[in-house]
Image (cartoon, grey):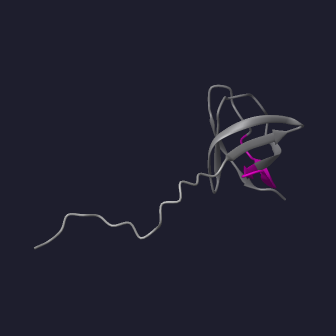
Amino acid sequence: MESNTIRSSSPKTGYSATVEMFLDIGGVHHDISHMGPDFIILAESTNCPPCDGIVGLVVDGRLKQWTVRLPDGISTGTSRVRTAKAA
């Protein structure tokens, strides 16, 4: 007889990391809601010409930062922003 029970191979720890993401352009932080390998989605749109920016990722208080190129800039009304490797 088959069982319809789904078994989890990972223990339930109740742990959930605290995560913050932001884009820094010229010292101004913009909250990021989603991030992918070649894009970010801003929590609120803004207007900015093509430039370099710094993406910050904070996980449980540990900050990692890297520079990205915004080849298309950011347009007001559009939250998805294309990113590329900075030179």
Report if residue 60 lies within the magenta region: yes
Which SS does the magenta portion mostly show? strand
**72 or 34, which lies in front?**
34
Which quadrant of the rendered structure holds the N terminus?
bottom left
Q: Is residue 4 left or right of residue 32?
A: left
Which quadrant of the rendered structure holds the C terminus?
bottom right
Measuring from the top left, give residue 33's x and y in whole percent: 62, 40
Please give the name of the residue rendered at 41% of the width and 70% of the height, measured from the top-left corner.
9
Report if residue 35 lies within the magenta region: no
Measuring from the top left, give residue 6's x and y in whole percent: 29, 64
Q: Return the residue found at the far right.
A: 27
24 above or below 10? above
Measuring from the top left, give residue 80's x and y in whole percent: 61, 39
Q: Count every numbered label the image shows and give the total.
A: 0
Q: Return the residue found at the far bottom.
A: 1
48 above or below 1? above
Q: In the picture, residue 30 is in which quadrant?
A: top right
**33 or 80, which lies in front?**
33
Please give the name of the residue rendered at 72% of the width and 28% of the height, measured from the top-left corner.
46
Please give the name of the residue rendered at 66% of the width and 29% of the height, measured from the top-left corner.
44
Bounds of the magenta segment: 57-72
Q: Return the residue found at the far left.
A: 1
Please give the name of the residue rendered at 77% of the width and 48% of the height, measured from the top-left corner.
55
13 above or below 42? below
Q: In the picture, residue 20 is in which quadrant?
A: top right
Measuring from the top left, give residue 51's x and y in whole percent: 82, 43
**17 or 82, which lies in front?**
17
Q: Is residue 14 left or right of residue 60?
A: left
